[in-house]
Image: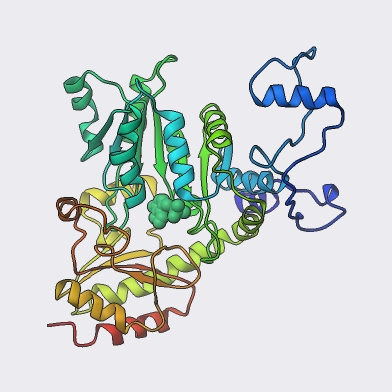
Amino acid sequence: MNELETRAMFAGYHPASGDGAVKPAMQPSSTFVFPTAEAGAAMMASAYGLPTGLEPNDPPQGHIYSRLTNPTVDVAEARLAAWDESEDAAFFSTGMAAITTAILAGTGPNRPLWFCSPLYGGTEHFVREILPTMGVTVRELESLDELEAKVAELKEIPGVIYMETPANPTMQLHRMRTAVEFAHRHRTEEHPVWTYVDNTYLGPILQRPLELGVDLLLYSATKYLGGHSDLVAGAASGNKELMGGVKAYRTFLGGMIDSWTAWMLSRSMETLHVRVERQQENCKHVADFLRVHPAIELLQSAWNEDLPAADQAIAAEQMTGGGAMLAITVRGGREGAFRVLNRLKTFQLAVSLGSSESLAQHPASMTHVAVPDEGKQKFGISEGLIRLSIGLENPKDLIQDLDQALEGSAH
Ligand SMILES: Cc1ncc(COP(=O)(O)O)c(C=O)c1O
């Protein structure tokens, strides 16, 4: 059996199915021809979960319409499933489409969502402001250690436990096994308790939550999976039964990815490990420089040197590297941070992360601007905080750029 990188390289496509072409073609067709009317009727019935009228109840395989499935999307999904070693994967038009669709598929009036904060701002807004208007009970946990106490206090079992680890932008870690063990203790056939993890920050190369028993991974594929700041997409990957529901919701909510973006993702995922490993290596150099720089009040990262002692044990259990994201706090609040951001030349001043080029942004006024002041304070999203996403440039240039931008900020 081939190793992971080899399996992911070839997953979903064989040249024999594509005129010998080494790479899969891009299939933009919106609709697909049925071999016969009878076959079309059976395929449509099957797509809606209805009896096909066939004996056995086995419809012909094939594509119907690209909001449901598409051959190019199939290749991308097979590649993500190969990287994650998941039972099934699905791509979406954006990370938010993947997250909202998966949450709606897993929750309901008797299936509360319990989430561990902090979350990415868009997810946080959806679960706090929109999901409750749909009749879903939403509860915030400060830590996964509260899970059993909450059950005792509220006499309620969640339908979904949702978390992001490391959390954006300040790198809090959550111990995924705690949620998995809780879910296994409380799930029944009538009331499954699912664990969801947004794995955008470390991705399949540095963190493999399914191996710890997590049920579903969510990704902003706009980040490392795409990796070049030239596409917007999302993904879900995990347990087959759960993914069946997620894909059905995708069909009706309509967040399907388009074939061009799926094709780009298949291509990008061939270099995922090379990019992530090199970005991580570059990040190590930059972090070593920043850790001792007199202008930096605080460096937060998922590297052991920067993690609180309790988080170091969690990191050892569930991560194989610190990744390529940093959060630095400079003196002088917003003015100090803006001064540094405006002086950067090699780092691009832009939101997003996980791309080939390095990016810098100010969470308090940019990605997390909608988080109320109280929440910003609780999660350490201070005015002096700058988030850095380390790319593939030569790290010497990144260090030099930060050094000149930080000049004069030390006092
Ligand atoms: C951790 C995380 N999850 C989800 C998202 C949402 O993804 P998208 O912007 O692709 O919709 C983002 C976007 O920044 C993110 O950083």
* Residue 150 can be seen in this image: yes
Residue 231 location (% of width, % of height): 55, 60
For the residue pair 397 and 355, the one nearer the viewer reads as 355
For the residue pair 78 and 121, the one nearer the viewer reads as 121
Quarter of the C terminus within the rendering = bottom left
Q: Residue at x 16, y 82 (%)?
A: 410
Mark count: 0
Q: Residue at x 57, y 45 (%)?
A: 91
Q: Residue at x 87, y 28 (%)?
A: 36
Residue 350 location (% of width, % of height): 39, 70
Horizontal side, residue 314 vs residue 190: left or right: left
Residue 403 location (% of width, % of height): 29, 84
Q: Is residue 267 above or below residue 234?
A: below
Q: Residue at x 26, y 80 (%)?
A: 340
Horizontal side, residue 94 vs residue 72: left or right: left
Residue 247 location (% of width, % of height): 57, 34
Q: Is residue 45 above or below residue 180?
A: above
Quadrant in which residue 209 is drawn: top left
Quadrant in which residue 407 is drawn: bottom left
* Residue 206 can be seen in this image: no
Horizontal side, residue 94 vs residue 129: left or right: right
